[in-house]
Image (tube, rainbow, N blue to C red):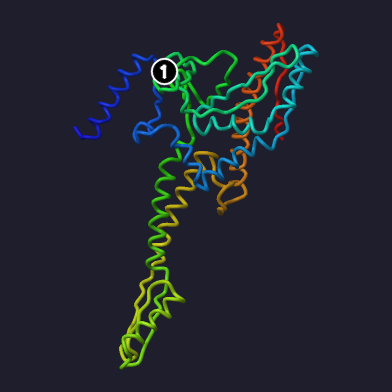
Amino acid sequence: MKLSNVKEKLLQETYGIYYRHTNLLPNPDTILRKIGRGIEVYRELKNDPHVWSCIQSRKSGILSLQWSIVQNNSPEIVFELVQSVFNKLDIYQIESDILEAPLFGFQPIEIIWQAEGSYLVPKELKARPQEWFAFDVDGNLLFKGRNGLEYSKVPEYKFINVQHEASGINPYGHSLLSKCYWPVTFKNGGLRFWVNFTERYGMPILIGQYQRGATNEEIQQLARDLDSIYEDAIIVAPMDVKLELHEASRTSSVELYLELIRFANNEISKAILSQTLTTELEGGSYAASQTHFQIRKEIIMADSRLVQNSFNQLIRYLVELNFSTSQVPKFLLHLE
């Protein structure tokens, strides 16, 4: 048995013993388990310009929509309170926080409550780091203690836990950024080799020639003069010595790096946006472009349901804490 397989088996057994005794459910993300890091590694992927562009493109589909509160047969006093609360909240920032859930798999959002007259209302909503939380075997959200070993169930009405494609087997949800980890890693490696390649072969060689009989001081001064106008690749040679530079064509090498980066960017676009045309200018027919934009509309619709469900959960909390009615207003995004 390979050493890597032995380590993987021992790690699984260790996890099994730990989580059986703590009643915790481990995050089944295979990327995190293989690299031995926490979910914060996905946050680092946002430093990649293409990843950031795709995230902004996906979020902008929701952030550009208008929203409203629908009365939905609720009592007038309930409707007025909900509308007043939402007018004071930073809805667009909260929407952006909610849309972190597809990127990481889940996103806990803490509700900061305050008394306002005779009502208890949310003052603000704050997104909290995913690494502060875990799930038990029943799928309940748990908060990690200060020492990192103690977990407690989060208080009722305190958190909205936004989950992306979660299930009973995997309450951590499916992370889109996990699909970007290897493309970003390989792209960064390709960029590093490309920079080294450019430094080595991208600069022309500057040749300085001197007359026979020149002193060492004159030769060194010529080299210093050339160095002052050109930082690298200097040759100082006698005029009667013939020097020829034969530079092989390296276009194919450059194209190889470009193709690797282009492929990685396309994989990132497909993972986050499910298509590539809105982030990469590509050739194609009108029908193909319409297909890509239809996919984008479907992603916006899916994200809108996630946002609406989260805000409607907040409304239910607000009504349950202050009223006895079962009729609650609804938060609605207006899809164009």
Kindly give the residue lying farthest to the top in the view shown.
Answer: 324
Residue identifier under label 1: 150
Q: Is residue 172 above or below residue 265?
A: above
Residue 223 locus on image (x, y percent): 38, 80
Indicate the quadrant containing the N terminus: top left, top right, bottom left or bottom right: top left
Front position in the image: 158 or 138: 158
Secondary structure beneath dot 1 equals: loop
Residue 127 locus on image (x, y percent): 57, 28
Q: Amino acid at mark 1?
A: Glu
Residue 286 locus on image (x, y percent): 62, 49
Residue 165 locus on image (x, y percent): 51, 26
Kindly give the residue lying farthest to the front in the view shown.
Answer: 217
Front position in the image: 296 or 127: 127
Q: Is residue 95 left or right of residue 86?
A: left
Front position in the image: 72 or 144: 144
The residue lying at 65 percent from left, 35 percent from top is 62
Front position in the image: 68 or 259: 68
The residue lying at 40 percent from left, 55 percent from top is 192
Kindly give the residue lying farthest to the left in the view shown.
Answer: 1
Q: Residues within 10 Å of mark 1 (few under 14, many from 20)?
A: few
Q: Is residue 53 left or right of residue 19?
A: right
Q: Is residue 278 left or right of residue 224?
A: right
Q: Is residue 39 above or below residue 180?
A: above
Q: Is residue 189 above or below residue 180?
A: below
Q: Quadrant of residue 234?
A: bottom left
Indicate the quadrant containing the C terminus: top left, top right, bottom left or bottom right: top right
Q: Quadrant of residue 13?
A: top left
Q: Is residue 333 left or right of residue 100?
A: right
